Image (cartoon, grey):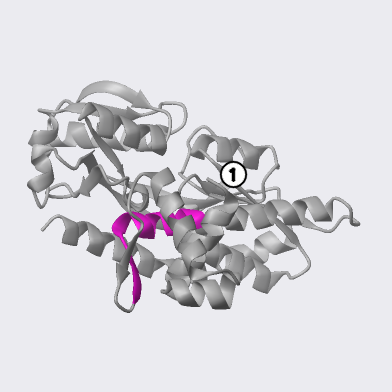
Amino acid sequence: MELRHLRYFIAVAEEGSFINAAELRLHTSQPSLSRQIRDLESEVGVKLLERKARGIKLTAAGQIFLDHARLVMMQLDSASDAARRAEQPARPGFVVGFLAGQEVIWLSETMRILQEESTGTDITISSLSSPELANALMQNRMNVALLRRETQTSGLAFKPLVREPLVVILPAHHRLAKRKAINPNELARESFIAGSTKLAPVVRTAVQEYAARCGIRLNQKYDAENLSAGMSLVASTGCLMLLPLYATNMLVPSVVARPVQGEPPTVDLVLGYNKSNTSPLLKRFLLRTDDLVAAVKKQYAKLEEKLTATAR
């Protein structure tokens, strides 16, 4: 897979047409563009676009791939800018950290607010696990981060952003995938994948407390170091996993998500920063936390709607 494949796919998806993308955006021939998209679908292993009489329509896999393709291109642009800046006089820098996977939801609005507040600052984006983000904040290697409320920290302050329910991640062919919602007692009858104690302690604790509250014992068979590893284990082993709602943005076609019956376990996403950080941009950004949350709320509402709709 080459970067041009991502550029071509994004152009077709945004234009809604091979012809418009070829003539208006890419300045190439329509047959050549179609061939490039077929090569991309072959490389990914799933169908990304459906050809219609009046243009194209993204498949469910295509919509997820589009989100990640845009993120790759944004990160590439950021890397190119950083390389060019290395040849220029130093300018003020500001580092923002994201819990890996949350960029799809929060990056666009975060960047918009930061750029409105300071046009002369170089902004660097970093994606890490929550404990790694907390360590970076404590060491002043990062100005602000979207992470979990980690307990093993010193000198950090946290501002709440959103409380996410945990949902059940399971293979699409699993018998429980037919349910609209899954009873907690059903979880106790299945093999289970837990999050890493090192990289996802807050989520792991939330799952353990939920099991205790429901009076069930989870049959843990595997640990997953990250979301990708967790999804792969779910698909390949038939085990179940509890993950925050945002993870439904990253589902592969062989894996589905279902809510739990009753009150679900939850985890908080917070904005973290070092109390000793005197950056003026940080102070202005923190004052606009409410703006950030308000702009992103609709995306969480769409995730919940999609979760409910796919379970019908």
Q: Which image quarter holds the C terminus?
A: bottom left
Along the viewing direction, whichever of 219 and 290 lies nearer the viewer: 219
Q: Quadrant of residue 207?
A: top left
How many numbered markers are drawn?
Answer: 1
Identify residue type, mark 1. Answer: Leu
Q: Position of residue 275 (x, y in %)?
A: 65, 49
Q: Residue furthest right?
A: 89
Most foreground residue, 305 or 92: 305
* Residue toward you, 287 or 100: 100
Report if residue 160 is visible in the image.
no
Query: Which x, y percent locates residue 12?
Result: 46, 68
Taking the image as shown, residue 177 lies to the left or right of residue 97, namely left
- The magenta-colored residue range is 55-69
Q: Is residue 47 above or below residue 230?
A: below
Q: Dot 1 corresponds to which residue?
A: 156
- Specify the principal SS of the magenta part: helix
Foreground residue among 311 and 235:
235
**Was residue 59 drawn as part of the magenta stretch in this picture?**
yes
Q: Position of residue 48 (x, y in %)?
A: 36, 57
Give how far across and how far down residue 106 sits, in percent. Answer: 49, 60
Residue at image position (36%, 52%) is: 246
Crowdedness of circle 1 by 10 Å Cα count: few (<14), some, many (20+)? some
Say above or below: 21 vs 100. below
Residue that appears at 82% across and 55% down: 85
Q: Is residue 259 left or right of residue 176?
A: right
Give above or below for 54 relative to 26. below
Furthest toward the top, the residue is 221
Give the quadrant of residue 182. Answer: top left
Give SS at disc 1: strand
